[in-house]
Image (spheres, rainbow, N blue to C red):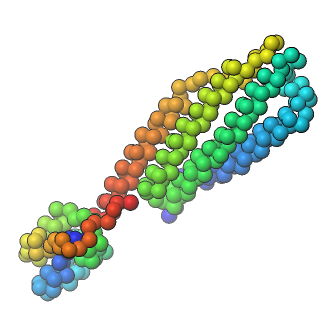
């Protein structure tokens, strides 16, 4: 079936496919940075603008922790992107209102919640990381919008599931 | 499913084909076929009304309950 918004779907599919790759590259880059912090600590810290201090180790530990949490976010983002891609595929196939898509939305909501929690963990690490001469500045800020998005996704997943069940019932109605 | 559709018996008794019934009640042949073979999940009162009118019968002539048969399958 040819859909009027076929072009938009194609763009979404490609964008999501690209984001899957970008996410993996991001993960590899962060992992590389983390590994590099062990191999050439002084050079990396100098290039990141970490000033010499007697307790610089606290800064280094904090930055490593932030990098580690960043790596944890990669599989979560992967789950979201792959499920979104599957949903887009069903739209392309012309039948998105199915129970399977409701079951894809639910883990997307849960995973997004996980990512938000990781974001909070990063904020806590950043706030507690400091040396005698400077604080760890990663431009962290709290925003209510992603939390609302998580809530909205949970609600939408339930609504979608209900709608898909209703449609399944209607399909068998004569 | 424990609900048995006896549409085939009624059609036979009235000497009517499914195609003729489809034309009379305005329900598509595939949908009537789904009903006849017991694959329908639900039936609208309007459909039941039209079939009863066309076949000059009661809803009970078309549907029966057999407790010996398995329950409705779990909704996916």
**Nearer the observer, A2 or B6:** B6
Residue A6 appears in the rendering? no
> Residue A98: percent from the left, percent from the top?
43, 57
**Nearer the observer, B40 or A69:** A69
**Nearer the observer, B23 or B53:** B53
The residue depicted at 13 percent of the width and 66 percent of the height is B49
Q: Is residue A35 above or below residue A104?
A: above
Q: Is residue A164 above or below residue A28?
A: below
Is residue A109 toward the left or the right of residue B67 in the image?
right
How many marks the image carries: the answer is: 0
Is residue B53 toward the left or the right of residue A60 in the image?
left
Is residue B18 toward the left or the right of residue A144 in the image?
left
Q: Is residue A84 above or below residue B75?
A: above
The residue depicted at 74 percent of the width and 42 percent of the height is A26
Q: Is residue A53 above or below residue B61?
A: above
Residue A86 appears in the rendering? yes
> Residue A68: percent from the left, percent from the top?
72, 36
In this view, the residue farthest toward the top is A133
Work out which quarter of the rendered image holds the C terminus of chain A and state it: bottom left
> Residue A166: percent from the left, percent from the top?
33, 54
The residue depicted at 51 percent of the width and 42 percent of the height is A109
The residue depicted at 89 percent of the width and 37 percent of the height is A39
> Looking at the rendering, which quadrant does residue A116 occupy?
top right
> Residue B23: percent from the left, percent from the top?
21, 75
> Looking at the rendering, which quadrant does residue B10 occupy?
bottom left
């Amino acid at each position: 079936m040819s859909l009027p918004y076929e072009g938009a779907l194609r763009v979404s599919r490609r964008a999501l496919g690209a984001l899957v790759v970008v996410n993996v590259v991001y993960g590899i880059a962060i992992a590389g940075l983390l590994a590099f912090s062990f191999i050439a600590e002084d050079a990396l810290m100098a290039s990141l603008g970490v000033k010499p201090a007697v307790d610089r180790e606290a800064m280094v530990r904090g930055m490593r922790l932030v990098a580690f949490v960043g790596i944890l976010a990669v599989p979560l983002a992967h789950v979201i992107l792959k499920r979104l891609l599957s949903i887009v595929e069903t739209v392309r196939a012309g039948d998105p209102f199915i129970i399977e898509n409701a079951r894809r939305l639910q883990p997307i909501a849960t995973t997004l919640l996980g990512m938000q929690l990781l974001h909070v963990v990063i904020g806590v690490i950043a706030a507690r990381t400091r040396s005698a001469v400077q604080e760890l500045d990663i431009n962290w800020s709290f925003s209510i919008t992603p939390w609302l998005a998580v809530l909205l996704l949970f609600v939408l997943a339930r609504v979608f599931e209900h709608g898909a069940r209703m449609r399944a019932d209607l399909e068998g109605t004569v | 499913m424990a609900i048995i559709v006896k549409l085939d018996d009624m059609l036979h008794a009235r000497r009517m084909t499914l195609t003729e019934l489809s034309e009379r009640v305005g329900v598509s042949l595939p949908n009537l076929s789904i009903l006849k073979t017991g694959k329908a999940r639900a039936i609208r009162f309007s459909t039941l009304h039209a079939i009863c009118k066309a076949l000059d019968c009661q809803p009970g002539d078309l549907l029966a309950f057999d407790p010996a048969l398995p329950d409705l399958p779990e909704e996916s």
